[in-house]
Amino acid sequence: MNSLYEFIIEPLGDRYANNKKIGEKNLILNTKIESWKFVNRYAKVLEVPLAIKTPIKKGAIVVVHQNIFRRFYTMQGKQSNSRSYFKDNMYFAGIDQIYLYKNKDKWKSFGDRCFIKPLKNSNNIDIVREEPNTGVLKISNDKLTNLDIHVEDLVGFRPGGEWEFIIDDERLYCMKSNDIVIKYGNEKNKEEYNPSWANSG
């Protein structure tokens, strides 16, 4: 059972990450299906596409677009699966809906995606916690490597192109290579910013 052009995946755990364990207690974070920020982004690859050569292997763990597992309300007010739904907890995922993959123990970007960790704002009188449009490259890709931009480099990026993800308890911004507009180098005196709520506890 293979698709020609799409992956077949299943969610790791529930479709929504609505709960968070704090010590011995379970905190309810969300009760609405419309809240896309709480949709589970992690999936397991059941089958790879037949017509596309891909480094992603069957059984790999992937990070996907939030709309794959998301549920919606129809015009009649009934809950409905996304158009990615296949059957029996299986879903289709296009190559543009997968951002990270892990065949073994290390995350790798898929396609033209990269992941940036924001910096803590050094201006103590500013209420904004992180420096705008600046961060440390944490997960790179071949295009950036060819441009001599490497993991742990401090970079600047265009506003509005970043998407927030929580990867292994770290809040990272996903964006395309073209969203990175400047390389500052490797500056060790900059403090990375990770809000406390990003940690699963």
Image: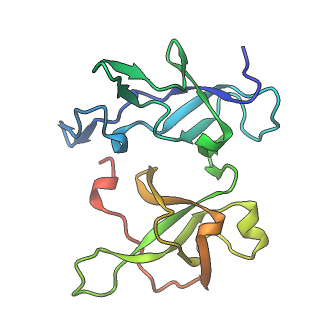
Above or below: residue 85 compared with residue 37: above
**Residue 191 at x, y = what percent?**
41, 78
**Residue 176 at x, y = what percent?**
61, 61
Q: How is the image coloured?
A: rainbow
Residue 149 appears left or right of 17: right
**Residue 170 at x, y = what percent?**
42, 57
Task: Residue at 46% x, 75% y: name it.
Answer: 133
- In the rendered image, which quarter is residue 179 located in? bottom right
Residue 136 appears left or right of 70: right
**Residue 174 at x, y = what percent?**
53, 57
Q: Residue farthest to the front?
A: 75
In the image shown, does 14 or 97 lie closer to the viewer? 97
Task: Residue at 34% x, 36% y: name it.
Answer: 17
- In the rendered image, which quarter is residue 36 located in? top left
In the image shown, does 1 or 57 lie closer to the viewer? 1
Regarding residue 83, the answer to whether it shows in the image is: yes
Image quarter in which the N terminus is found:
top right
Above or below: residue 145 compared with residue 112: below
In the image shown, does 127 or 138 lie closer to the viewer? 127
Numbered circles on residues, count: 0
Task: Residue at 54% x, 40% y: name it.
Answer: 64
Regarding residue 103, the answer to whether it shows in the image is: no
Above or below: residue 166 compared with residue 178: above
